[in-house]
Amino acid sequence: MGRVREMISVDGRECWTLFDTGVRSTYVLNVVTDKLRSTATFHPIRTALGGGVKESTCTALLQAEVQGHPVSTHALVVDEIGKDEDGRCIEVLFGALAMRQWGIRPVPEEGRLDLSHYPEQFAEFPPAWSDTPAGARQTGRLEIDSSAFDQVSLHDVRIYGWFQYREQYEVNLVLDIDYLAEWNLLPDNRFDFIVVPATLTFLDVVDLQIDLNWGASLRREEPSGVICSSAGELEINDFRRFAYTDPVYTERSYLHYELGLWQPQGGRISLGARGFRIVGRQEGVRSDRQTFDPAQRVPLNTVRDGRSEPDGH
Amino acid sequence: MSKLEIDSSAFDQVDLHDVDVYGFFLQRRGSEISLILDIDYLAEWTLLANNHFEYLVAPAALTFLDVVDLQIHLDWGPSLRKEEPYGVMDNFSGEISIYDFRRSAYTDPIYTEQSYLRYELNFSVPLDGRISLGAKDFTIVGRQDLIRSEHRNLDPDQRPPLILGG
């Protein structure tokens, strides 16, 4: 998880803001919202935040400038967010979903924000199934390619495994995932999701690095003798893409991709590829869990699902 | 030819040198996780009169049961490089090839009391690649009968797919 503190400007007022990828939603103090347009919620929304439960009855449209870049997002209004390590009151807590939307990436080791992916314009590539009513989306087929990178969020997506598939001179890297096609914040402040078992394929892969370390899984917590086993769960924190600078890559249209994992913590899969594709293997279902029922998942097929063009194309 | 089935009681007879790995999968059953590797197992190497080898090979699943302490480090490094002055490109092979397979005992009672052993797979491709883990057992199960071949690995299109889940 990445956390960086920085001042942002809200209607000309400087606000001490925590950018935290470990928090999904965005929160703003009620004193900041004086100048913001706010709306009462139908129900109180309770959130576990900063070691306590906060309740908000109001949401606001937060329009601010981050390092001179205008951003806007929906925020929950709370009386208190908490204090930072220096005892300073946090006025805005900027969450992962808004950071994803605005291309903001905390670089905690350097104590700064990376806005190199700030979108100068939004290019919308809605998948075919997303322009239908929510209920009908469950029956659509998921198909996304790398032209829609800005609309792809892999945050909290589970990986079940991967394999390499060679096609003549090219190697594809294929990941078996549960894609979260939609997150909905419910009135009781829980999320529900549309979960689709899917195949994420990176095409014509180079420079592959896989570094996963779950650490010591078994430990005895004295004096109760509790044993903890956590090896083997793979969950994505963020999915990033960069341009190469070396002509040997740029001349051949390679881009650099990076999957940062929060489980195992600090895990990383990085590679160069000419593109990627996410294809659902079955219809998605609405669920309050981020993973599909294992017994109901259409199994991955290491031959059929490895090909650049899946069956039926 | 017979169907391949090996478990950890035969560890001393298992040689994974030059065995290719095609994929890695994690499968949870209750509170336990298995690590499954899709491999071409080399059941036999025969040195022929012409100094070539012949192999008895089968596509197989190498499964480590109830995995703990898992570490996977695979790094192919920069795959594309221009070798001056010729400008030759070196493509990423995607190959994963095991160099050796070792097993050792834990000393911490938390592992020994639960019958865990420590396993290590070292790789020749990618160079210095390594997977280490603790597990209670492993199995190697062929997906088709062993076949005699002059190649160490099977044509990907001829391998029966490994189908997981469901």
Image: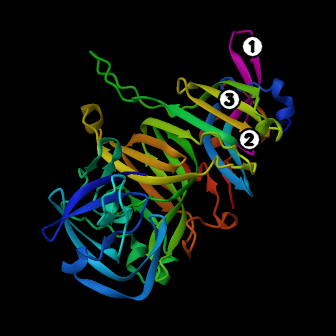
Q: Is residue A134 left or right of residue B100?
A: left
Hey, what amino acid is under mark 2? Phe
Q: Between residues B23 and A15, which one lies in front from this camera angle?
A: A15
Q: CA distance from mark 1 to mark 2?
A: 31 Å
Span colored in magenta: B40-67
Circle nearer the viewer, 3 or 1: 3
Q: Is residue A166 left or right of residue A216?
A: left
| Position of residue A87 measured from the top left corner of the image (x, y, whole percent) | 34, 56
| Position of residue A305 measured from the top left corner of the image (x, y, whole percent) | 56, 53
**Residue A285 appears in the rendering:** yes
- Write down the residue under mark 3: B120
**Residue A312 appears in the rendering:** no
On the image, which quarter does residue B73 sit in?
Answer: top right
- Write down the residue under mark 2: B64
Relative to A50, does residue B143 appear above or below in the rendering?
A: above
Circle nearer the viewer, 1 or 2: 2
On the image, which quarter does residue A62 sit in?
Answer: bottom left
- Write down the residue under mark 1: B47
Badge 3 and badge 1 both on one subunit: yes
| Position of residue B46 measured from the top left corner of the image (x, y, whole percent) | 77, 17
**Mark 1 secondary-structure assignment:** strand
Label 2 Cα neighbours within 10 Å, binned few <14 / some 14-19 / many ≥20: many
Q: Between residues A123 and A220, which one lies in front from this camera angle?
A: A220
Q: Is residue A276 magenta?
A: no
Decide which of tag 1 and tag 2 comes sooner along the chain. 1
Label 3 Cα neighbours within 10 Å, binned few <14 / some 14-19 / many ≥20: some
Badge 1 and badge 2 both on one subunit: yes
Q: Chain of mark 2?
A: B
